[in-house]
Image (cartoon, helix red, strand yellow):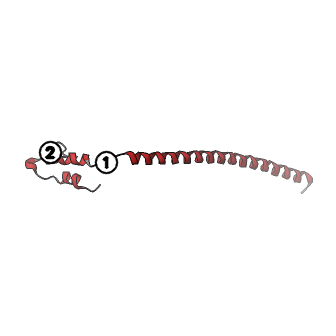
Amino acid sequence: MNKKELFDALDAFSQNLFVTLAEVEAIKKNLKTVIEENTALRLENDKLRERLGEVERSTPIKTNQGRDNLKRIYEDGFHICTDFYGQRRENDAECMFCDELLFRKV
């Protein structure tokens, strides 16, 4: 290898190092941004968890009021199933679709 080829090889290697260094700096910058965003999101998540806990403690326990209303409608002789909703049940006959809605486990 003569001196010119050696110099050209070193120059190319030097250029590759500069490009690699620029890429590493860009990756560091992106990583810093991601870490800052992650920290901000963790803080926000903690605040939201605290707020959710406050809301859950202050919210009264819900009852099965909707299910009770459907049961009353069914006992009044009307369908509550999606196929026949609001139609009168013939001779107050049982409807397996309505029963399934009333007695399914939630």
**Residue situated in front as seen by the camera: 1 or 16:** 16
Q: Which residue is mark 1?
A: 62
User: Label 2: which residue?
Assistant: 78
Q: Position of residue 80 (x, y in %)?
A: 19, 46
Q: In the picture shown, does residue 79 fall above or below 106?
A: above
- Measured Cα–Cα span from mark 2 to mark 1: 26 Å
Image quadrant containing the N terminus: bottom right
Give the numbered dot on residue 86.
none
Query: Considering the image in quadrants, where does the C terminus appear?
Result: bottom left
Whichever of labels 2 and 1 marks the residue nearer the N terminus, that label is 1
Q: Secondary structure at mark 2?
A: loop
Residue 18: give x, y in percent of width and height: 78, 47
Q: Identify which amino acid the numbered label 2 is placed on.
A: Phe
In the figure, is residue 52 to the left or right of 93?
A: right
What residue is shown at x 64% (from left), y 44% (from top)? Answer: 33
Crowding at dot 1, Cα within 10 Å, few <14 / some 14-19 / many 20+, comes out as few
Residue 88 is situated, as x and y percent measured from the top left of the image, at: 12, 44
**Left or right: residue 2 compared with residue 66:** right
Residue most extreme to the left:
91
* Image coords of residue 16 (percent x, y): 78, 50
Crowd rating for badge 2 (residues with CA inside 10 Å; few <14, some 14–19, many 20+): many
Q: Name the element at disc 1.
A: loop
Q: Residue furthest top?
A: 86
Q: Is residue 3 left or right of residue 95?
A: right
**Which residue is more in the foreground, 8 or 56?**
56
Q: Amino acid at mark 1?
A: Lys
- Depth check, mark 2 against mark 1: the one in front is 1
Q: Looking at the image, which residue is at 27% across and 57% down? A: 105
**Which of 32/41 is in front?**
41
